[in-house]
Amino acid sequence: MNKNIKRIGILFFASFILWSCNDDYLERYPLDELSNETFWKTENDLKVYNNSIYDRSKKDDQNVVLMAHDSKFASTRASYQYWDEFTDNLSPVAGEGRTNRYKDVRAGIHIPGNRQSFGYRAWDFLRAVNVGLDNYQNAVDLDQAVIDKYAAEARMFRAWFYSDKVSKFGDNQWVDHEVATDEDDILFGERDPRDEVMAHVLEDLNFAVDNIPTNWGLGEDPGRLNYWDALALKSRICLFEGTWQKYHGGSNANMWLQEAADAAKLLIDGGVYSLNSTGDYTTSYNDLHRSQDLSGNPEIIHWVKYESGIRDNNIMKYYVYYSGGATKNMVEDYLCTDGKPITLSSEYAGDAQIEDVFVNRDPRLRQTVLHPADKDYYAYNKGDVNDYPRMANMQMSGGKSSSTGYHIIKTYVSSVHAGGHNSGTTPGIVFRLGEVMLNYVEAMAELGTISQGDLDITINKLRDRVGMPHLTVNPEMDPRYANDGVSALIVEIRRERRVELFSEGFRYNDLRRWKQGKKLEEPNLGIFWDDAAAARYPGANPQTTIVDGKAYINPYKGTSWENPVFDEGKHYLWPIPLNDLSENPNLGQNPGW
């Protein structure tokens, strides 16, 4: 982040004034000390205060605002890269406790215990935001436009915070000011209706878009959130709410979808960002994700920077160790090079051996999952001498194993993996143009107003980057998705989103907002297993499950995650933690919990 955000000494003051008392004794304030009464005067005061909010956002296991990777050892359990472990995209290592929360939610066996990661937490962050909003107007000598740009920054944070809480818990208490200790109607109040809270969220988003600068003039990358970030966030939040209302019930679905489309289109048409491309179909996609410095990258709208010894992480090392591997279901969703799904294409080579699944497939597959022939290209596992893939929970000595046989290399960088403990600097992508393009095209399809031109400026540009055929407005229906209750075009838009945004933290929320939670009942499976595979991987004796007469590795067979369940009346929302309910029973529990 920029240098102002690192001014920790002033941050401590900003935190102090939030909760310190003031007896107004003769209204004499020490000239050598800062206080709430002497602060809030200059633009620098407002800037420094907002810097403290950025600092509070860094606990990624508590707060998803600016979510990237938590710092140091905590990054082994908190990162947007792990969020696909909630879903049918990844199969994290079965015996690893760090991933149990992900596996439990994905299997539908989580319980309403106490506060969980990414859950009903970080209310002190909201308090900090509201304290600022209560006090910015005290800078009476500043132009209103100056005050409003810092208020816009704070309101963007608040919208982000609340949209996440609503997405997970539904109804929430809306609080827009610093809560006093005697405000029992809030401290012990009921939750406000979802629609009411989201109406406030939209107000905050619109204020941010209207008032935050396009550029703060700091000359640093990454810096403060700006107008383009506000548009990206608005497109993301409004798409979630619009599709949630469309598929779960709601009266304003089209309004939200139009807001999402309009925000995304403003960003796309702005001409400030373009897709990152190497000009090589075999490297263009994961070149973006393997880069350790995203400064000046044309696709990146906002990112989080890590610096060795200052703010570092373990994401490269632990993601390789514990993410397990991509699932059979995920791998099968990549199109063939004729632009057709494997169920319809004559180009599909099958899966008799792992090399076959890469034949005539979307190049993004080979840039996401390790092809055995690419081990040396990636210097996989720090360049060890073993052949890959290697399977977990089996007697294959040496190397690093995968629970499914499908090792993930989308973000892999051997030199970072080889670094010391707590020394990684893998950046976090907060917003990129590829996501915004997908937000736009999905919103337009859900509105029923999509055109070929909309596809050409979004999905087809993403496909151009990897040399795939263009999508048209009338694709053939993939039989695997014929019962989803949506058009073949929406099926393909959703597929494109799954493929393009794999392991970027979107799949779980996407399945929930589409009301497709039942897809999580399909067991996580891996590569095809037969006598030839047993001979190729000596010592391995995996548990398998038969699908259409063929055996596939089943990493969770015999465990509590073997048969995932998704209760439609319960699992679309998370439970309110028991300790929060004990403090305020009026919050009420979500249905089914």
Image (cartoon, helix red, strand yellow):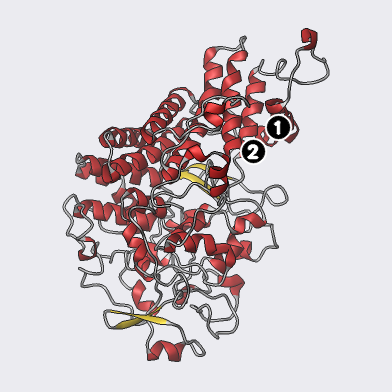
Say which quarter of the image contains residue 535: bottom left
Q: Earlier in the sequence, mark 2 or mark 1?
A: 1
Residue depicted at x 82% and y 15%: 30
Say which quarter of the image contains residue 130: top right
Residue depicted at x 58% and y 15%: 137
Would residue 424 be seen by someone viewing this image from the given angle?
no
**SS of the residue under disc 2:** helix
Above or below: residue 47 compared with residue 391: above
Q: Please state the horizontal and vertical placement of residue 255, each as a whole percent of the image.
A: 28, 32
Name the quarter where the N terminus is drawn.
top right
Kindly identify which numbered label has been placed on residue 61: none
Above or below: residue 447 compared with residue 327: above
Q: Please state the horizontal and vertical placement of residue 248, each as a whole percent of the image.
A: 29, 45
333 or 164: nearer the viewer: 164
Q: Are marks 2 and 1 in contact (CB under 8 Å)?
A: yes
Residue depicted at x 50% and y 67%: 92
Would residue 101 be seen by someone viewing this image from the given angle?
yes
Kindly identify which numbered label has been placed on residue 11: 1
How dense is the environment of label 1, judged by Cα within 10 Å: few (below 14), some, or many (20 and up)? some
Q: Please state the horizontal and vertical placement of residue 466, each as a whole percent of the image.
A: 35, 58
Say which quarter of the image contains residue 468: bottom left
Q: Please state the horizontal and vertical placement of residue 126, each as a whole percent of the image.
A: 56, 33
> What is the three-letter code of the residue carrying label 1?
Leu
Q: Relative to residue 39, is residue 486 drawn left or right?
A: left
Above or below: residue 483 compared with residue 173: below
For disc 2, the marked residue is 55
Residue depicted at x 36% and y 58%: 499
How dense is the environment of label 2, judged by Cα within 10 Å: few (below 14), some, or many (20 and up)? some
Q: Relative to residue 279, is residue 491 drawn left or right?
A: left
> What is the three-letter code of the residue carrying label 2?
Asp
